[in-house]
Image (cartoon, coloured by chain):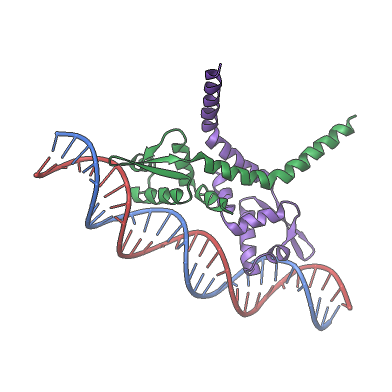
Chain colours: A purple, B green, C red, D blue
Amino acid sequence: MQTAEIFKAIGDPTRQQIVGMLRHQSLGVGEIAANFSISRPAVAKHLAMMRRCGLLSMEVQGREHIHHLHVEKLQQAQRWLDEMSAFWDEKLEALKQALEEDND
Amino acid sequence: MQTAEIFKAIGDPTRQQIVGMLRHQSLGVGEIAANFSISRPAVAKHLAMMRRCGLLSMEVQGREHIHHLHVEKLQQAQRWLDEMSAFWDEKLEALKQALEEDND
DNA sequence: TTTATAAGAAACCTTTTAGTTCCATGTCAA
DNA sequence: TTGACATGGAACTAAAAGGTTTCTTATAAA
């Protein structure tokens, strides 16, 4: 599965916060790091791993390295979750149907 | 965020497979471990951590320890992803609207 | 009541992760 | 062209993760 690395990427509170920050605006490394108590290099490492799995991409703009969130990757993760719970949705749907028919 | 541990749990290929296996039937530790090349205690450790975050629950049935998947937890994870991509869905919707109006 | 099965638990090892500090490099601005 | 800023990179450390093997315990079945 390819989704494992994406889940791993968002399976850490710091990185979850980074996703939250980049969801509206793209930001430079320093701007992102400013929101955390850990050092800038530590944040840079998180960004690097998030780039490696395609969740983020980087654009060099002068001396700033702007990071963009790739929502498609989040949607890819969502599809995996959909598959895994699909069976249960069917079950629940069937249950609902059965109950409705009972009421007839 | 509470979802981080859930994402972490499904952020590993072995554990993803376990979720896939338990989605239809609940199984004992040995039955689960039989599908992997790693040792049974290794699988048991994965199960333990998946239980810790509420993704799995255990039911002792004689000498077997049956594991059940908790789909609610997957749905909780889905809601986080929904939130994080909601902004973009709005953007895309707006774009779609704009394009449609262009065609008028 | 002995034997086989299902599993937990402990002890241990190796690799990865998450963090640090310090230094080098490229770019903007005075 | 000198200084300040924004980063990357290397070297190091501590803790967590993911495995292993061996031993113990509870249950089922012969």
Q: Position of residue D10 (x, y in %)?
A: 58, 71
The image position of residue B93, as x and y in percent, is 78, 38
The residue drawn where x is 66% and y is 68% is A40
Q: The C terminus of chain B appears in which quarter of the rendering? A: top right
Residue at image coords 65%, 63%: A44
Horizontal side of B58 relative to B79 (left or right) equals left
Q: Name the foreground residue: C10 vs A60.
A: C10
Is D9 positioned to the left or the right of D28 in the image? right
Q: Is residue B101 above or below residue D6?
A: above
Q: Quadrant of the N terminus of chain B?
A: bottom right
Counting labels gives 0
Using the rendered view, name the quadrant where residue D4 is placed: bottom right
Residue A73 placement (x, y as % from top left): 64, 45
| Rendered position, B73 above or below A94 | below
Could you say which is closer to the camera, residue A77 or residue B71? B71
Residue A91: give x, y in percent of width and height: 51, 28
| Residue at 52% across, 19% down | A102
At x 48%, y 50%, the residue is B53
Q: Give whichever of A11, B51 is nearer the camera.
A: B51
Extreme residue in the top direction: A104
Residue B98 vs residue A42: left or right? right
Q: Residue furthest front?
A: A103
Foreground pick, A3 / B93: B93
